[in-house]
Image (cartoon, rainbow, N blue to C red):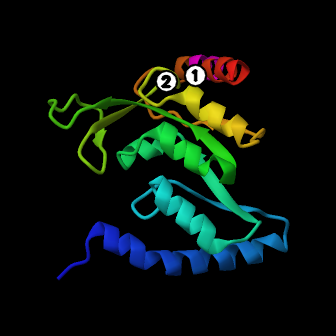
């Protein structure tokens, strides 16, 4: 009998936390802070990321919070970001256009854990509530770098220019 994805993630957490703790303790002696991104199978949703953060329990360890990646786990980005913003060491602003599982494959997309279609787009043009995520960052006291992680089909320089303007505008408004 094979373990379910949820069981596998629960079982791997102690091993993953131990490895992260060893790395962060080693890195601390060189003045390097370590972090993990909400990305991939084991640590993509906010509950798992928060559990990993708590298990590592080291002031030198934080999170690289990616606004868009929560959609990959079919999680509401605003709720997820509210949960993890206090642990943010670094932030990726990323946006996706979301199409329901029942729609035809729109092309140029990939599927979330639950089967929704996701396609990267310009920050502020998709379904990620970027402004609300930025509000949660400010509320948590974050005042550091935010990078744009663009995975869309639009021309890159135009997408980055527009996305950066949106980020600046949203930050000023919250």
Residue 147 against residue 23 in the figure, above or below:
above
Residue 37 against residue 2 in the figure, above or below:
above
Q: Nearer the viewer, residue 72 or 46?
A: 46
Query: Disc 2 and disc 1: Cα gap in Å?
Result: 6 Å
Q: Position of residue 2 (x, y in %)?
A: 21, 79
In the image, the segment drawn in magenta is 160-165
To which residue does mark 2 refer? 122
Q: Earlier in the sequence, mark 2 or mark 1?
A: 2
To which residue does mark 1 refer? 163
- Whether residue 163 appears in magenta in the rendering, the answer is yes
Asked whether the residues under the numbered discs 2 and 1 touch, taking CB atoms below 8 Å apart as contact, a structural biologist would say: yes
- Whether residue 164 appears in magenta in the rendering, the answer is yes
Q: Quadrant of residue 133 in the image?
A: top right
Residue at 77% in and 40% down? 144
- As helix, strand or loop, the secondary structure at mark 1 comes to helix
- As helix, strand or loop, the secondary structure at mark 2 comes to loop
Is the residue marked by circle 1 packed among few (<14), some (14-19), or many (20+) residues within 10 Å?
Answer: many
Q: Quarter holding the C terminus?
A: top right
Residue at 35% in and 45% down? 74
Q: Position of residue 136 (x, y in %)?
A: 63, 37
């Amino acid at each position: 009998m094979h373990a379910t994805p949820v069981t596998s993630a629960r079982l791997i957490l102690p091993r993953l936390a131990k490895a992260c703790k060893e790395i962060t303790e080693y890195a601390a002696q060189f003045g390097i802070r370590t972090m993990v991104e909400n990305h991939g199978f084991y640590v993509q949703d906010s509950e798992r990321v928060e559990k990993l953060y708590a298990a590592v329990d080291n002031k030198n360890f934080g999170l690289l919070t990616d606004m868009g990646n929560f959609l990959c786990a079919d999680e509401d980005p605003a709720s997820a970001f509210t949960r993890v913003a206090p642990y943010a060491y670094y932030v990726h602003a990323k946006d996706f256009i979301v199409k329901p599982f029942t729609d035809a494959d729109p092309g140029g997309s990939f599927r979330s854990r639950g089967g929704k279609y996701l396609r990267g787009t310009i920050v502020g043009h998709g379904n990620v509530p970027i402004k609300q995520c930025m509000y949660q960052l400010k509320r948590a006291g974050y005042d550091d770098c935010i990078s744009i992680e663009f995975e869309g089909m639009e021309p890159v320089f135009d997408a980055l220019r527009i996305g950066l303007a949106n980020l600046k505008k949203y930050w000023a408004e919250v």
